Amino acid sequence: MIFIDTTFWFAHIVETDDMHQNALDEEDDIKSGRYGRQVTSDYVLDELTTLLRREIETVHEKILGILAAPDIDVVFIGPALFSEGLKILREDDRRKFSMTDATSVAVMLSKKIDTIASFDDHFTRYASVIPRKTFKA
């Protein structure tokens, strides 16, 4: 399985994003199942919705498309994953590490996911990150 992070979704959807082409370059490998099923969370989609509202007019269609995709599992963060996220957040002393990031790691740990599609380098502590080409500052 591969966890899809907010930064990857955003870069994939927003054509003007600096990482757009890098996201497209990885798309075939991800969709082919090379890494297994795609997994994301409702927290990631919440964060993505907020960011996309500033960039595109078709936000609702994009999010509904992800939710309806048969090859993407959306994990809803309940009390147990939220608590695990809080523990991870407390243990990770980096200020850029958000609660959404922490719950993403909690999902990855609970499902034994060892690969994440992201442009945030702070996930390297927890998983193999693709694409490896470059990270956002």
Image (spheres, rainbow, N blue to C red):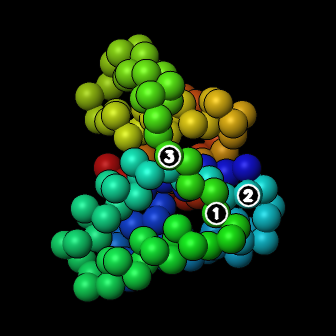
Mark 3 neighbour density, 10 Å: few (under 14) some (14–19) many (20 or more): some
Q: Nearer the viewer, residue 25 or 38?
A: 38
Q: Position of residue 12 (x, y in %)?
A: 47, 73
Task: Identify the residue under disc 2.
Answer: 37
Which numbered dot is residue 72? 1
Which residue lies most toward the left here?
A: 54
**Kind of residue indicated by mark 3:** Phe
Q: Quadrant of residue 31?
A: bottom right
- Above or below: residue 92 compared with residue 128: above
The residue that appears at 66% across and 45% down in the rendered structure is 115
In what element is the residue under mark 2?
loop
Separation (CA) of disc 2 from disc 3: 16 Å
- Counting from the top left corner in percent of width and height, residue 68 is at 57, 73
Circle number at residue 76: 3
Q: Nearer the viewer, mark 1 or mark 3?
A: 3
Choose between 80 and 90: the one closer to the eye.
80
Q: Nearer the viewer, mark 2 or mark 3?
A: 3
How far apart are the alpha carbons under marks 1 and 2? 7 Å
Residue sitting at the far front: 79
| N-term mark: 2 or 3 | 2
Q: Is residue 48 left or right of residue 5?
A: left
